[in-house]
Structures are given as structure tokens and as C-alpha cells.
Amino acid sequence: MGMSVLGPDINESIYKFSVNAEGQIRFGLGAIKGVGEAAVQSIIDERNANGKFSSIFDLVKRVNLRAANKKTFESLANAGAFDSFGIHRAAYFHHEVNETGNFLEKVLRFGANYQDSLSASQSSLFGSGTAAQIPEPKVPVCEEWGFLQKLRYEKEVVGFYISGHPLDEFQYDIDKFCTARVSDLKIVSMFSGNKFESNADANKVSSEDEEPSANDQSLERFDKIKNTSLRLYGAVNNLFLLTKYSGQDPEVFNGIDANFYPRPRVYTVGLSLDF
């Protein structure tokens, strides 16, 4: 359909999925695991009343921290909702040596102290109505998460990949090396009379591949791939290797030399199909 799906953003997302001014779908804050409706409503109300948040420090000074607690902020950070602030996700969870709490916990304490100071000033008989000057915590200098680690934390709170896919870094290899898709294994199983099975998830079709049905299109594909060598990538817990598929059950190998397959959980699988 040509529509882009963007990740959650603290300055644009609402509770549910929405469409922004550019016609792109924006992920809703309410769909993030660990982020409650009260927290989202507090963020949206403050944003509508006083404008977008300029930084993570501006956010904790303005939002109701009783509604949006530590768990809320952790989930938002992992989901990428704070990416527009220019601080990478690993920094929020970085813990300096000999210091109490990680950076995100320091930020929340800063926000709570600021709001307490502002409240005390406003309630004072001679108060000026402004909070005392409280220094902002220093953003830590630390290594960013690797691509796969960032996606793993993102999926834990969102439920699927938004900012990328674990196989993106192997796209060149896939384009130049692979001659088949995982769904082709289903087609082979369908028309060969042998059911392809594995104790891993290798026989599961990926989200990009719909499970084929026994129709003319699948039969046409089967005619093209039989008696050929199929090359594909598979991200599975146990490496599977299908060789000389001639009415025999596929061979399953579970102890492949890690030095030969150095990429974690992403394996090159060569399939030789003989009918």
C-alpha cells in the first residue's frame, strides 16, 4: 500500500495508532507493554497544553510522575519513544561506577525534585512561583547497543520489529546468495509427499511469507525449484540442513561448528533437492 509505519514518538504519538501530517502511520503509546492509559493521557494532556517536549529533562519536569512511573519510562525508552531527544537508548540504562542508579533513574529523581521544589515555592507565602535551580544529570558517554540487541529490547515492549529486522544487516548476502524463500520448503513438502518437520522453528514461515496453498501458483513454483539447489537464510534455534530430498526424511544437524557459522542464530543453509 506504500504507507510507512513509524515507531512511537513522545512528541507525536497518541494513545492509539494514528496518521500524521505526512500520511504516515505512527505507533500508539498505549500499545507499548508497561505503559498504562493514565500515563499516556498525562503525557498527551501536558503536550497539548504547553507544547512539545524539548528533552528528556523537560519531559520529567512537566509530566505527572505519579501517573508515568519508572516502568513507563523504561518501556518508552526501549520502544524508541525518546529517540527524537538525540540520546541513544543504551544511555538511559547505563550505570556509572560508584553511582546509585542508572541514568534514567537519575532523570526521574531530578524531575521529582524539580516538581517538589516548584510545588513548595508556589505554596509558600513569599514564594516566587519558580522552582529552585536543580542541575540536570549529565548524559553518560557509553557504547550504543548493537543492532540486534536494540531490536530485541524493542520487540519485548512493542511485540514486533519496527525500526528494523534482524536480517537487515545480511540483506546484501540474501540478495546475492539466496535463490529461495522459507515458504519454498512448504511447497516442497506439499508436492513431494513428505512432510517437512524439525524440532526447531525452521519449518515456520516468516511474517513476510504466507503459507502456500495447494494451487496452480504453488505447483508452478514447485516445478521451478525441483531438481535444483536452493540457497536460503534461516534464523532458527537449531540449524537444519536438508540434503538429497528424494523421498527420505530431511537430515537434522544440531552441533554445527560455531567457527564455521559465526553469526549467532543466523545460518546459511544449502538445500539440494533431487526428485
Image: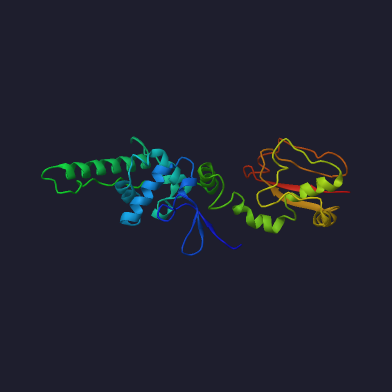
Q: Is residue 158 left or right of residue 72?
A: right
Q: Is residue 259 visible?
A: yes
13 or 92: which is nearer to us? 13
Rendered image coloring scheme: rainbow
147 or 162: which is nearer to us? 162
Hey, which quadrant is residue 94 in on the image?
top left
Q: Residue furthest bottom?
A: 22
Q: Is residue 65 left or right of residue 180?
A: left
Q: Is residue 149 left or right of residue 113?
A: right
Residue 91, image x, y percentages: 41, 46
Number of marks in the rendered image = 0
Q: Is residue 93 visible?
A: no
Residue 38, image x, y percentages: 39, 43
Q: Residue at x 37, y 49 (%)?
A: 43
Q: Residue furthest left?
A: 126
Residue 262, image x, y percentages: 64, 44
Q: Residue at x 86, y 43 (%)?
A: 193
Q: Name the quadrant of the N terminus.
A: bottom right
Looking at the picture, does residue 78 appear above or below residue 101? below
Hey, which quadrant is residue 114 in on the image?
top left
Q: Residue at x 25, y 46 (%)?
A: 135
Residue 121, image x, y percentages: 17, 44
